[in-house]
Amino acid sequence: MKSVEILKDIHYIGAVDWDRRNFHGYSLSPKGTTYNAFLIQDEKNTVVDTVDASFAGDLLCKIAHVMPVEKVDYIVVNHVEPDHSGALPRLVAACKPEKIVCSVMGEKAIKEYYDAKDWPLHVVKTGDTLSIGKRTLHFMETRMLHWPDSMMTYIPHDKLLISQDAFGQNYATSERFADEVDQAELARQLSRYYANIVLPYSSVTLKILEEVGKQGWDVQMIAPDHGLLWRGAGVGQVIEAYRNFALQKPANKAVVFFDTMWRSTEMMAHAVAQGLSDAGTPVTVMSLKANHHSDVMTEVFESGAVLVGSATHNNGVLPPVSAMLTYMKGLRPQNKVAAAFGSYGWSGESLKLVTEQLTAMHFDVIEGVRAKNRPTHDQLKACVDLGRKVAEALQAKIASF
Ligand code: FEO
């Protein structure tokens, strides 16, 4: 694909990776991703961000489609994670830039990742600016959104905020703007990306949204480093979506995820779901044999209640449940009502172990249910009651939030 002029003299020079399916355990299936990068033609031609190393050739071709690569004067590195800086060595070699702009933490990371001792690194901090001709670039550090080195670049001349990972989606498309695609799918991809990447940094996200407000920037377009670009009404919508994501207000929605050995825990999962549904809380039931942990995590993020089922296995929790809880804990979801359930053959530790993990995540935990071998009618009724109790607790939590 060719470069795309997204604003006068500002070109999209990123790459669409239709085949990417995984970022260190986070499944992108089946949507792939994009690595977004931008070329600003001005007195000092400036590239903002690059792409994954495997797409370095694409990046250079897209620049060449606009102007000779050696005419690039400045490179801005908003984020050093290699999906955005992997092509940097080839671009630096090709254009020999006057300046490579990065944050103080970015300078350290660039030197750690690349043989950058002769690179003209130019360190900026929040509030610093850089004139590139008729435009001036404004920088804002956004440490831990997504890495310590992260920063954003705002260009008042074009009212354009290049936001690196923030406001992104892992969503490979031929379209470049958010208003050109199916809105329900876009919303799902935005939420999925937040749930699996940004969620642990929610408090940072709220501070950054506040900081963007304080800067008084008149943002009319947001260009993240993944997925589709936001313009028009989409700018306010995505900022509001991020504010709501970061606040993690509980929603009247539940997810029941589980793994089972001989279907007893599965029977309990369905009974728990029945209780939730009977009490007016919509519920999604997800077997960990059938669902990737990234999909389950998206449901966890969007749900106010999380119910976790595991049979006891070798005095512990079934490995897929253990892995899911580890993944979930790392992403630090908040403001959930939770409960555990599960079957056992003789020792029955899983209920206690899962309950301890849910408690350690600071959820409001309701005492769960366990059943020996096959759940009896009364035990299934106890599972239905558990679902009902969780729904009532969730609805009370929402009312008091
Ligand atoms: Fe898309 Fe934090 O890199």
Image (spheres, rainbow, N blue to C red):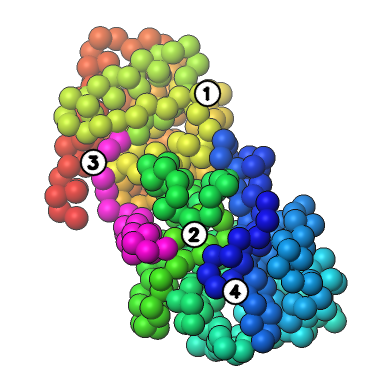
What residue is shown at x 39% (from left), y 39% (from top)?
299
Q: Which residue is mark 3?
A: 252
Question: Mark 1 falls on what kind of element?
Answer: loop
- Please say if 239 is above or below 96: above
- Crowding near pointer 2: few (<14 within 10 Å), some, many (20+)? many
Is the CB of mark 4 within 8 Å of ligand 1? Answer: no
Q: Picture coordinates of residue 156 (x, y %)? A: 47, 82
Q: Which residue is mark 1?
A: 289
Mark 2 to mark 1: distance in Å?
35 Å
Kind of residue indicated by mark 4: Asp
Q: Earlier in the sequence, mark 3 or mark 4?
A: 4
Q: Earlier in the sequence, mark 1 or mark 3?
A: 3
What residue is shown at x 32% (from left), y 54% (from top)?
248
Task: Report the mark closest to the observer, 4 or 1.
Answer: 4
Task: For residue 301, say whether it is visible.
Answer: no
Is the CB of mark 2 within 8 Å of ligand 1? Answer: no
Kind of residue indicated by mark 2: Leu
Disc 2 and disc 3 in contact, CB within 8 angstroms: no
Question: Mark 3 falls on what kind of element?
Answer: loop
Q: Picture coordinates of residue 8 (x, y %)? A: 55, 73
Q: Picture coordinates of residue 263 (x, y %)? A: 44, 13
The circle on residue 229 is: 2
Kind of residue indicated by mark 3: Asn
The circle on residue 9 is: 4
- Which residues make up the magenta segment? 231-254
Mark 3 to mark 4: distance in Å?
46 Å
